[in-house]
Image (cartoon, rainbow, N blue to C red):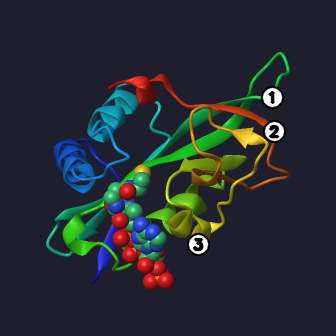
Amino acid sequence: MQIHIRAEKPPDEDAIDELLDLAFAFDSHSQQNEAHIVRVLREQGQLTLSLVAQTEQNELVGHICFSPVQIDTGNTENLSGWLGLGPMAVNPRLQRQGIGRQLIQVGLAEIQRHATGCVVLGEPGFYQRFGFKNHPDLILPGALAPFFMAQSFSGDVPSGQVIYQTAFQTT
Ligand SMILES: CC(C)(COP(=O)(O)OP(=O)(O)OC[C@H]1O[C@@H](n2cnc3c(N)ncnc32)[C@H](O)[C@@H]1OP(=O)(O)O)[C@@H](O)C(=O)NCCC(=O)NCCS
């Protein structure tokens, strides 16, 4: 299927909400609050990158976003320059057809131009394909280690605790 990946625009906002609600509806790891998280990130100006996948019929069938995270390394100042991937979603009707792959590849290529590295919480079998792996010294409090992964675009992956935007604390 021909998919066009582009940056989100204001008229996409409702379709992104609907897509996230649909894709996470039956996900037992989800609190079904992804649409709310993305809205709060947008309101707070923390959507560093938000991409949509659109069909030739202009249906919005995929979304990925990245937002800044801080890394508490134990030093006085937290490390910045890192981004968190997610949430991301593909319409369940069109999953396993390569749309998620395209969204991640375009997203990573774009953020690598500015960011130092990227973290993600999710399915290792999926994200390892794109260069993410668990680094035992980089921790997301409360997350099971294998599911929290990182990749650096410049230098080593740091040691420390990752702090996501407050938008992720909303329920
Ligand atoms: C996760 C998700 C975005 C993947 O999108 P997708 O379009 O189905 O992914 P793709 O078809 O591009 O898959 C790329 C590769 O990963 C594999 N893959 C897809 N989902 C996978 C999963 N859950 N676990 C392991 N591998 C997976 C595919 O088989 C494919 O492998 P291949 O290239 O060898 O054929 C989609 O399944 C989704 O929206 N899920 C519900 C929401 C969610 O869990 N989001 C992620 C957490 S934020």
- Name the mark on residue 73: 1
Q: Position of residue 51 (x, y in %)?
A: 39, 55
- Circle 3 residue: 129
Q: Position of residue 132 (x, y in %)?
A: 65, 61
Specify whether residue 102 is in view: no
Distance of label 3 from label 1 (alpha carbons)? 27 Å
Mark 3 residue element? helix
* Residue kind at label 1, given as amino acid type: Thr
* Residue kind at label 2, given as amino acid type: Ser
Distance of label 2 from label 1 (alpha carbons)? 6 Å
Q: Earlier in the sequence, mark 2 or mark 1?
A: 1
Q: Are marks 2 and 1 in contact (CB under 8 Å)?
A: yes
Left or right for 24, reference 71: left
- Circle 2 residue: 159
Q: Are marks 3 and 2 in contact (CB under 8 Å)?
A: no
Mark 2 residue element? loop
Q: Residues within 10 Å of mark 3 (few under 14, many from 20)?
A: few
* Residue kind at label 3, given as amino acid type: Arg
Q: Earlier in the sequence, mark 3 or mark 1?
A: 1
Q: Residue at x 17, y 48 (%)?
A: 18
